[in-house]
Amino acid sequence: MNKIFSFVFIVLCFCTLLSAKKNNIRITFESGEEDVKEILIKEVQCKIQDEDGVSHDVKLRKDKWYQFRWKNPVRIKDEFWKYGENFSLIFSYTENGEVWEEVVINLKSNWFEREFIKKGKRLNDEPNIEYGLGVGVKIDQDKYPYTFKVTLVKKITKITGRVLDFVTRKPLSKVRVFVDQETDNNLGSDDDILYIKNTNSDGRYEFKKGYSDNPQDWTPYVILLKDEYLPEQKYFNLEIGRENSLPDILMKSTRFATSRNCKKISPLLEWNPECYECTCSDLDLKWYPQYKICGPPDCPEGEIIVPIYNEQGEVVDLDCEKLIIVFFEGGIFEQPILISMSFSQEWVGYKIFYKEEPIGEIGTSGEVEFLSGEKLDPKYYPLDDPYFTAGGIVPFFLKKEGQKDEQFEFDLPSKHQTEDGNILRLNALRSFKVNYLTGDNRQIYLGDIRDPVQTEPKDTNTRLNIGDSIDFGSTDEESECEMMISELRKEVNYCNWADAVELATYICNSCYNESQHITAAKDIARVFAMQIITEESDALTFNRIVKDNLGDPNHFQRALAWFDLIESLDWKGINLSRTLTEQAELKLLAVRFYFRAAELFYKKDIGKASLLKLNSFIYKINMKKDSEDNSGYFDEQYEEEVDFFWLAQRALKKVDQYNDIAKLAAKHEHYLPIRLSYEKKILNALEKNK
C-alpha cells in the first residue's frame, strides 16, 4: 500500500515538474453582432504563430473542470516562452457555416517569465498596450494570470480596386467611389462612414463592408465621380467575406470628349472637338447630309440651296437659286398635301383616325378609302396643314371593333426616285402615296412610294397664316437684327462660342420676332448650351449654373428656356435645309446639355439631404407700353424648379427622342447615329443612388 502511495506521489511530483513552465491565459469571447446571443466555444479554433511565422496547434480548455457546457470562459495552457520574443494567438470562428473575422492577440514571452510575474507587473503599465494586443482585444485582468476579452465579428467583405486615367494610364487620386445603395441596403451594411471612399495617390480604393447575406437578384456595382472627369459605373461579382478585387477602371476626362469617326460618314468630314460634332474640313462650308456633300453655309435672302447633278445622277455641287413663291391676296397660297396610303393585308377592316377624327377605313386590298367630304378621289386625303414636313412624323390611330386600339407614329418619306432615276425631295411635292408594311414585330414601317406630283417648294423658317399681309419693306431695326443673326450664324459655324454669346444676348433682347425662326433659335440655344458643355472645370461650370447673374437668367437658364422654346416652334415648314440630321443633332445637343448639368448637380449634392434647386425661365415678347418694339425678355417661372432628377429625366427623354429621329435620319439621309448607352446607363445609376 505504501508502495502505491509512493508511486502516485512520485507521478504527481513528476507531472508538477513537467508543467512547471506552462502558463495559463483565460479568455472570454463575446459577439460583436447584435443578432448573435452567445458564442459557441466548440466552434472556436485557436493556433499559435511564433515569431518566425510558423503555426502551432493549441487546445482550448474549459476554465473549470465541472463546467459541462461549452460556454465562456476558456483557458489556454502552454509553454509560451518557447515561441520567441513575440508571438500571436489567432482565433477563428464559424457560425452555421458562416466564417467570421479572425482575431489576433499579440503577446510577448517575457510577460510569462518568473521574474515578470513574481514582481507583480501589470500589462496596463506597458506602453501602447491597447494597440499592441490587437483589434477586438481588451484586458479584463492585467496581473498574472491574465484574462482577456475577445470580440468576434462576422467576416468583413473587402472591395478593392484601382482607378486610372483613360489616356495616360496614370493613377487618379481623390476619385469618389461608392458601392450602390441596393447592395448596401439588401446585404445589411448601414455604415455611412464607409459609403464613400476616395482613392489614394496610387489610385487605389478599399471598402470593408459588414455584409451578412449574398446577392442573388442583382449585380453590385461601384460608381466613380471625379471633378473634370466623366462619371463611371463598374459592375462586379461579389463574394461575401472575401476580398473582391475589381479590374482597373479607366476614367475619361471631359477634355477627352466622346468623338465620332466622321470618315465613316464622308471623307470630307472630320471631328471638331470645339464643335462637338463632325464638320467639313473647310469650316467655310456646311455639311448637307441629304446630299452627302459640303456646300455654302447660307444663301442670300430669297434663295435656297439646290443640288447640281452629273450625268450619272450624282450630286457634285450645291448652288443657291431664286426661291419662287406664289402670292394670293397678300398672303401665301398653297393647296394642302394630298396623301394616299396602303397597308398590309392584316390591317384590313381597321379604321384610321387623324387628329382624333375618323378619316377612312382600310379596304380589302389594303388601300385606305378616305371619307373626305370634299370633291376628291377617295384614295387621297388632304392633310389640312400645308406646312407638313416630308420626312417628319405623323400620328395616326388605328382601331377595329372588338380589337385592341393600336397607336402608331408614321414617318413620311423624305425623297422619291422617279422611273427615269431622278431623285425628288418630297418637300417639293404636293401629293404622294405611301405604302406601310408590317414587320415581324408588328411595327409598321415605310414601304415604296408612287406617283409624286411636283410643284414649286417654299422655304421659310416661320409659319405664315394664309391671308396675312406681307410687308416687303424693312426697318433699320429689322435690318440690324438680320445682320446680327447672320453674324451669329458665322460664329456658330466656326464654333466661336465666347464671341457668339454677345450676339446671342443682343438678339434675345432686341430681336424677338426674328429669333423665333428655327434657324436662329437653334443657333441661340446652341450658344448658351455650349457654355456649359465645353467648360472643363466642374467648379467653374457649377458656379455658372448657380451663382452667375443671380438677378438675371444665366447661360444655363437661358439654354433651358431656348430648348423649351424650340419644342414649341413649328418644325413642319417645307424647307430644303431643315433635315432630319439637323433635328437629330439638336436632340443630341440637348442630351449633352442636360447630362452635363445633371452630372454636376449630382456631384455637388452627393451625400446631402436637400437637393439644389433653381427656378426656370421662359422667353417672352415684351408687351409693356414703354418697351421697344420687337424686344424680348426672360420671365421667371416660380411653379417649376430645376433639380438633379428633373435634369436626369429630361436627359433620358432626349436620349429616346434622339434615337427615334436618328434612325429616320440614317434611313433617309447620310447620317451616322451615335450610341447614347453610356449616358443612359450613368443617369439610371445615379437616379437609383440619389
Image (spheres, grey):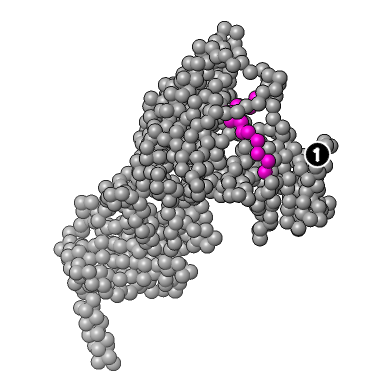
User: Where 592 falls versus 39 (above or below)?
Assistant: above
Predominant SS along the magenta part = loop
Residue 510 colored in magenta in the image:
no
| Quadrant of residue 143 within the rendered picture | bottom left
Q: Is residue 82 above or below residue 197?
A: below
Q: Nearer the viewer, residue 73 or 682?
A: 682
Name the amino acid, label 1: Leu
Magenta-tinted stretch: 452-464
Residue receiving disc 1: 376
66 to the left or right of 81: right
Q: Residue at x 58, y 34 (%)?
A: 575
Question: Quarter of the image holding residue 129?
Answer: bottom left
- The verdict on residue 461 being magenta is yes
Indicate left or right for 649 with 92 as reference: right
Image quarter where the N terminus lies is bottom left
Query: How would you rate the neighbour count of disc 1 (Cα within 10 Å): few for under 14, some for 14-19, many for 20 or more?
Result: few
Q: Residue at x 72, y 42 (%)?
A: 339
Residue at 41 percent of width and 40 percent of height: 279
